Amino acid sequence: MENFKLQNGVLIPSIGFGTWQMFDETVAVKAVTDAIGAGYRHIDTATIYRNEKAVGEGIRKSGIDRKEIFVTSKVWNTERGYDKTLKAFEKTMDELDIGYLDLYLIHWPADPHQYPDWKDLNFETWCALEEIYAKGVVNAIGVSNFLPVHLEPLMYSAKVMPMVNQIEYHPGYMQNECVSFCHKNNIVTEGWSPLGMGKLLDNEILKGIADKYGKSTAQICIRWSLQNKVIPLPKSVHPGRIKDNLDVFDFEISSEDMKKIDNMAETGWSGLAPGSIDF
C-alpha cells in the first residue's frame, strides 16, 4: 500500500475502504474486518452512515494494531456550528470506541442557496475542528464536498488549513477545477464513489481498456484515480471484490489510455452538489 502525505506530515494510505450505505450492523462489521484482512489500512465512515459503532467493532475484531489503521469520520450537516460539532465529535468517538481518530471532516459545506450566513457557519464548524485537532485527539482535519467557492473564505480565516477534501470523483465526473485548486493548495483530494455508483462497471470505454490490461473495470477506475493523485474510496461487501479493488499496484495505465478516460462524457454522477442539495 502506498501513502500520500498530508500538510502536517501524517501519512494516509492511498486507497480507503468506503462504508457508505452499510446500514446493517452485521454486514458492516464483517465488511470492515474482511477489508482489513485483505490489506486495507484506511477506513472511511461518517455519522450519517449510522455505522460508526459497527466500523469500530470491525476494526477491533481485525486483530490489527490500531496504530496501523487510518480511520476517518465526518460531522453531519445538522450538527454544524461550534458547540454542536464538538458534541457530535464526542458522540462519534463513543460510537467508534477506538481511542482516537485519524481524520475528521466537515461532511458538506453550508452553501449560499440554503444559508445567508454560510461563510460564518462553515468557519464556526471549522473552529471546532481546529480545537479538536489542537487537543491531539485527531491527527488531521479537513472537509468534504467543498468547492473552491467554499474553501477560499474558509482558508482566509482559518488558523489550520484543511488537509483533505473528499469529493465525488470518478471517470465521467472529474471536478477538475476543484481538484486543481486542492493540489495547488496542498490539500489532498479523496474521491468518493470511484466506480460511479457502479454505473461505470459496464462502460464500453472502460471495458475495452480493462481487457487490454487484464484487469476489471473497477480496477481501472481505481488505478486511474491514483494516477491522477486522488485517493479512491471503493466500497463493497463482497470479499472477492474487496480484495480485487486493492489489487491495482502491479500495473500502470498508459498516458494515452489515461487521456481516453479523462475525456469521457459525463456519466455515473450521483446528482449531488453543494449548490443544490436540500439536506
Image: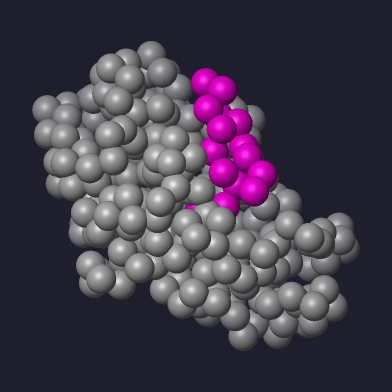
Vertical comparison of 213 with 118: above or below: below
**Rendering coords of residue 120 (x, y %):** 24, 27
- Looking at the image, residue 263 sits to the left or right of residue 268; the answer is right
- Residue 175 lies left or right of residue 76; in this view the side is right
Q: Is residue 12 visible?
A: yes
User: Can you say whether 201 is above or below 101 in the image?
Assistant: below
Residue 251 picture quarter: bottom right
| Residue sitting nearer the eye, 107 or 44 | 44
78 or 13: nearer the viewer: 13
Q: Residue at x 31, y 66 (%)?
A: 28
* Residue at the spot 28% in from the left edge and 51% down from the top edge: 56
Q: How many marks?
A: 0
Residue 205 appears in which quarter of the rendering?
A: bottom right
| Residue 170 occupies quadrant | bottom right
Q: What scheme was used to colour the molecule?
A: one colour
Image coordinates for residue 50, horizontal then vertical, percent:
21, 59
Magenta part of the protein: which range?
Answer: 1-16
Seen in the image, is 248 located left or right of residue 47? right
